[in-house]
Amino acid sequence: MPPLKILQYPDKGLKRVSIPVVNFDESIQKVIDDMFETHYATPNCAALAATQLNLEIPWRITVIDYSANKDQPLCLVNPQIIHREGEQNEYEGCMSVFPQHIHEKVKRAMKITVQYQDRYGTPHEIEAEGYFAKCIQHEVDHLDGHVFLDHLHKIKIDRILRKIKKVQRQGKNS
């Protein structure tokens, strides 16, 4: 199957709130497989949330693999951040927000604890720090209907929207 379509800001689909997975059946396994295929087919992609994709049902699923060799896949189903501590203020980009052009600093917790289920429904709890914590928080935001721009001041968002329009115009003239 070809990779799934990644929705692009300001597509209203990015505001969808995810639906928890209850049945870990064959159809969910296919969604997860398709998500990983899309993730690995997308250059410089660290992670994807189901709500970023053109799926009929926006399941509460995210796939992550930011390893250099793309050999450390992690699937978080129904993730919930249950603890946050510390702070980091680092640049983020997003596959749904003109990834080659838009990167902004976003405040996130430095360390988090996350409860989730794996692709087969087995419950897990992990602690994540630094980039890994930032990545999970970014994806959970997507699952809750938010993009990283929602963390920014309106003035910054207006500047980014102007930049997006400029990039779109240049693309049409190429």
Image: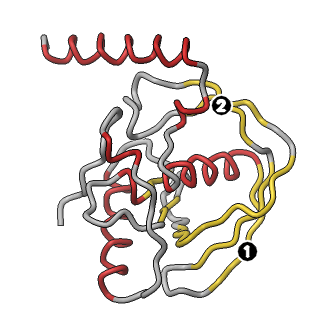
- Image coordinates for residue 85, horizontal then vertical, percent: 86, 49
Residue 55 position by quadrant: bottom left
- Image coordinates for residue 152, horizontal then vertical, percent: 60, 25
What's the mark number on residue 125? 1
Left or right: where 27 falls relative to 60: left
Q: Is 106 situated above or below 157? A: below
Crowding at mark 2 (Cα within 10 Å: few <14, some 14-19, many 20+): some
Check whether the beta carbons of the residues at disc 2 and disc 1 lie within 8 A of each other: no
- Image coordinates for residue 49, horizontal then vertical, percent: 45, 56
Crowding at mark 1 (Cα within 10 Å: few <14, some 14-19, many 20+): some
| Closest to the observer, 100 or 146 | 146
Left or right: where 5 falls relative to 67: left
What's the mark number on residue 106? 2
Left or right: where 32 falls relative to 141: left
In this figure, which colouring scheme has been used for the structure? secondary structure
Name the amino acid, label 1: Glu
* Quadrant, the C terminus: top left
| Closest to the observer, 4 or 46 | 4
Residue sitting at x 30%, y 44%: 7
Residue sitting at x 55%, y 65%: 72
| Element class at badge 2 | strand
Name the amino acid, label 2: Val
Residue sitting at x 50%, y 56%: 143
Q: CA distance from mark 2 to mark 1?
A: 25 Å
Point out the residue furthest to the right here: 86
Residue 166 position by quadrant: top left
Q: Earlier in the sequence, mark 2 or mark 1?
A: 2
| Element class at badge 1 | strand
- Image coordinates for residue 68, horizontal then vertical, percent: 54, 51
Residue sitting at x 71%, y 33%: 107
